[in-house]
Amino acid sequence: MRAASWRGCDRACAQESEIAGPALLFARQMQQRFLSELAELIRFPSVSAHSRHKEDVRLCALWLAEHLRSIGLENVAVTRTQGHPVVTANWLHASGRPTLLIYGHYDVQPPGPLSEWETSPFTPVVRGGYVYGRGASDDKGQLFVHVKAIESYLRTAGALPLNVKCVFEGEEEIGSQNLAHFLRWHPQAARADGAVISDMRILGADRPAIAESLRGALSVELEVQGQGKDLHPGNFGGAIHGPLQALCEIIAKLHDPRGRIAIPGFYEQVRELSPIERSYMARVGPTDAQILRDARAKHAWGEPGFSLYERTTIRPALTVNAIRSGDPGHSEPAVIPSKALAMLDFRLAPEQDPDAIDRLFRQFIARIAPRTVDINVRTVFSAPSVTVARNNFIVCAAAQAYRKGFNARPVFMRTGGTIPVVPLLQQTWGLPVALMGFALPDDGFHAPNERFSLASFSRGIATSIHFLHLLGTASIRTTEL
C-alpha cells in the first residue's frame, strides 16, 4: 500500500476496537512475565565491538529468534553476515492492510569500568522501579516493547491489524557495518509502507517526544608514529618528540579557545535554524540545568551563542573518545612510547556531508602535524544526518498512540545521536519513518548502571498496541501535531 492511498487519515480517531482492548488487558496482566523475559535478553553479553563476545552475540540472536517464533511470528530467520547475524521475522496475513517494518538492535556497548557498576552489567536487577543492565534501554528494552505489543495482539485476537516485518540487527553499536549489504541481498525484508524505530530518549516520564532529526556521525582513528621503538626518557627525553606528546599537541589545536571546531571550512554546510524553530526548541526542549543534571556535570562547555540542547542536536561537535599509547596492559611511566592513537568522534549538523568533513579533517591534520612524527588517519564509520517529516502518516499514528499510551501530547524533539539505518530506510528504500523512543534522559545510554524504567516499559507496550491499531485501521488524524 502506498502512503498516498491513506484516504482515511483525516477521519476522527475511533474508539478502541474489540481487538485492541483485550490486547491492552493482556499486556497489563503479563507485566511480570514480560519483565522476566526482558531480563533473559539482557543477560546475553552481546557486545558487538569485541571479538571475544562473537559467540555471545550469536547466542543472543538465536534466543531472540526463538522468542519471536514462540509468540506467533513466522518466517523467523537468523542470517549470518560478515559480522554479526541479522534476525528477521514477519506476520503477513492482513490482506489489504499496510505493512510496518519494526527495526531494533540487540547488540550492546561494552560495559566499561566494572568498578563503576553497582551490580554486574549482565546480571539484570530490578530496583527502585527500574531494571538495570547493559542494553536495558539501548536497545533491548525498547525493541522488546514492540515484540510484547505484537504478542499481546496475537495471544488475544489471533491476528494483527496490519502486516508486520521485524529486522533486528547485531551491529548497530559498531555502525551497522553489514546491514546495507544484508538488505541488498534480502530486499523483501525492508519492503514496507513505513518503519518505526525505538532507540532514543523522550523528555521525561510524562513527556513523550517524537524525534524529528538525528545528527550525522564520523568516527576516525588518528595514529601518530614516532621513533622505531619505545625509549627511556632518561636517555632520550629532550631529544625525541614523543608521539603521545605530539598527539596531544594536535588534539589541542582541534578547537579554538571559544569551543568552536578549528578546522577551516568546517561550518560552511551547517544550516542555521530560523528564530521560530529555535523558539520551539527552547519552549519544549530540556533546559541547560536539566542537561547538566542528566550528565552529572557541574559546568557546561562548547560553542557560544547556543543552548546546551542546541549544541547537542543542531550544532556539530568533536569529542576525543580515547587516547592510547604504549602497552595497554601495563603502566610504565618511564617510557617514551613509539606510537600513540586517538579515537575521535564527530557529530554532524543537518546537511553536513560526512565525506566532506572527512576530507577537511585530513587536510587540517596534514597541515598542523609536526614533521617529527608520521601521521595516519583511518575512517572507522560515517553516517549522514536525518530529518523526519512531521506530517507523514506514520508519525501522525505515533503521536496519537503516545497520547493514548502516556496520556500526554508528544512534542517534536531533535536528537544528538546517530542511527545508521534511518538514512538507509529513507533514502534507499523510500520509507517514511517514525522515531518514537521510550527511554528516559537519565537511563544511562552507553554508561555504567544503564537502566530502563518499568513504567516506560509498560507504557511503551500500551503505546505500541495503540500504534498497531491506528495503522491497521487507518484512523489517523494528520492534524494531530
Image: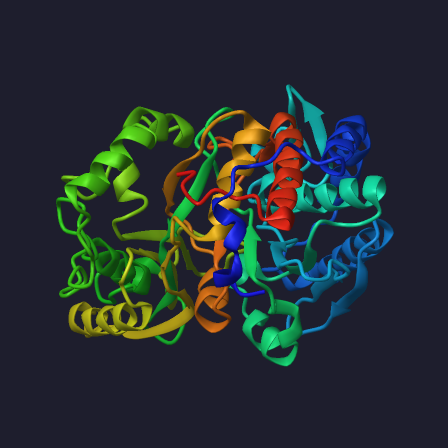
What's the residue at 25%, 49% (across, down)? 315
Q: Of 473 and 101, which appears nearest the observer?
A: 473
Is residue 446 visible in this depiction of the protein? no
Q: Of 121 and 423, which appears nearest the observer?
A: 423
The reply, left or right, for residue 357 in relation to residue 219 is left
Question: Where, quadrant-wise, is the C terminus in this rendering?
Answer: top left
The percent position of residue 325, horizontal first and vertical second, equals 42, 60
The reply, left or right, for residue 322 in relation to residue 63 is left
What's the residue at 79%, 53% (across, down)? 68
The reply, left or right, for residue 202 in relation to residue 184 is left
Q: Of 177 and 469, which appears nearest the observer?
A: 469
Question: Where, quadrant-wise, is the N terminus in this rendering?
Answer: bottom right
Residue 207 versus residue 357 in the image, above or below: above
**Among the 4 quarters of the image, the one containing residue 121:** top right
What's the residue at 77%, 54% (across, down)? 64
Q: Residue furthest top?
A: 128
The percent position of residue 27, horizontal first and vertical second, equals 76, 32
**Among the 4 quarters of the image, the one containing residue 41:** top right
Q: Of 316 and 21, which appears nearest the observer?
A: 21
Is residue 72 visible in this depiction of the protein? yes
The colouring scheme, among rainbow, by chain, secondary structure or one colour, is rainbow
The percent position of residue 161, horizontal first and vertical second, equals 71, 49
The mark tally for this picture is: 0
Q: Residue furthest bottom?
A: 185
The reply, left or right, for residue 295 in relation to residue 248 is right
Residue 397 versus residue 431 in the image, above or below: above
The percent position of residue 428, horizontal first and vertical second, equals 47, 73
